Amino acid sequence: MSSPDIVLGPNQYGKAEVRVVRVNRDTPVHTLMDLNVSSMLRGDFTDCYTEGDNTRVIATDTQKNTVYAFAKEHGITTPEQFLLLLGRHFTEYAEVDGGRWTAESYPWERIQVPSSDGTLTEHEHSFVKSKQEIRTAALTIQNGDEHLMGGFSDLTVLKTTGSEFSGYPKDRYTTLPETRDRVMATDITARWLFAADVDAQEVDFDALYAQVKQIVMEQFALVHSLSLQQTLYAAGEAVLGAAEQIEDIRFVMPNNHHYVVDLSPFGLENPNEVFQAGDRPYGLMNASVTRRAAPERPQAWEWIGGFA
Ligand SMILES: O=c1[nH]c(=O)c2[nH]c(=O)[nH]c2[nH]1
């Protein structure tokens, strides 16, 4: 029996984590795109939930098949472009008002092999997975508006000096000693939102991706850090300063603590040379760095896990 006091809240449904590998073999030098794509549809699917009526439900299996068919028909140039193809396709259905399409892109590099003169060259069709970070993209379509994001997750960085933490309030539970020199390490996850008026045909998403990643790493290295929060902000500010297409960049940065091991029981000094790499707990910074004039676009960020 359904109760008149209970209603269906916000909902979306689709196929999660469609693993698609697209090989381009048009020339002997093959290229490879390796994606994990999720497609989530939004619209009035109330009757499906409350009545078991599937007449409006685009099967998740169909969504999965569409990913594979589009990979063949259109190829995969960039994760962002591929999501735009999918999102625009699914929102053509009368039943679909909008949705969220996301992709992780796993980087592969060419294996280096000796050429006839002994120097190393890139092999035409053999690859090694490069594990530095995972590139991400997300597209949300709602009320006819497109919200497109680039990003990456788990870019692990560490600096052995040039980081301090002091000046914080002390209460009776504070035991952390102030430090002028510490190891700082984090796994950077970032997502950046393209301005609504950006023409996706005009953006070189690969070049922009490389630029953002480089800027974030550079800031981590070059800023003398008074806190991980300050480093985060500096990275965001530098990205917005360099890439006018981006209006908001958000970060998730755990503070991967490195504890100086007390070697005094062994009669040894330890001037920041031997550390215990902490696991849990860890500090965690979530922040958005945005242009003051940027419009509020909460739809872009809703249900994107971990981002403030
Ligand atoms: O960079 C830091 N920010 C903090 O907020 C914090 N808190 C803490 O205990 N260590 C650190 N480090």
Image (cartoon, rainbow, N blue to C red):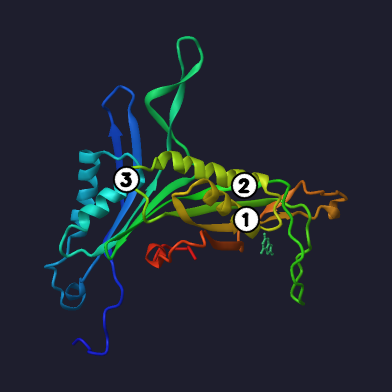
Q: Going by the image, does 188 lie left or right of 115?
A: right
Residue 271 makes an appearance in the image: yes
For mark 3, does the 10 Å Cα neighbourhood hold few (<14), some (14 to 19), or many (20 or more) residues? some
Q: Quadrant of residue 280?
A: bottom right
Disc 1 element:
loop
Which comes before the other along the chain, label 3 or label 1?
Answer: 3
**Among numbered discs 2 and 1, the one appearing first in the sequence:** 2
| Amino acid carrying mark 1 in the image | Asn
Residue identified by numbered label 3: 81
Vertical placement of residue 266 versus 77, above or below: below
- Residue at the (54%, 63%) spot, across then down: 286
List x then y, in percent, for residue 143: 28, 66
Q: Which residue is mark 2?
A: 219
Does mark 1's beta carbon lie closer than 8 Å to ligand 1?
no
Instruction: Sort mark 2 into few (<14), some (14-19) or many (20+) by Cα contacts within 10 Å.
Output: many
Mark 3–mark 2 Cα distance, whole angstroms, equals 28 Å
Within 10 angstroms of label 1, few (less than 14), some, or many (20 or more) residues? many
On whether ligand 1 comes within 8 Å of the CB at mark 2, the answer is no
Image quadrant of ligand 1 equals bottom right
Residue 307 located left or right of residue 178: left
Q: Where does label 1 land, which residue?
A: 256
Q: For numbered disc 3, what is the local secondary structure?
A: helix
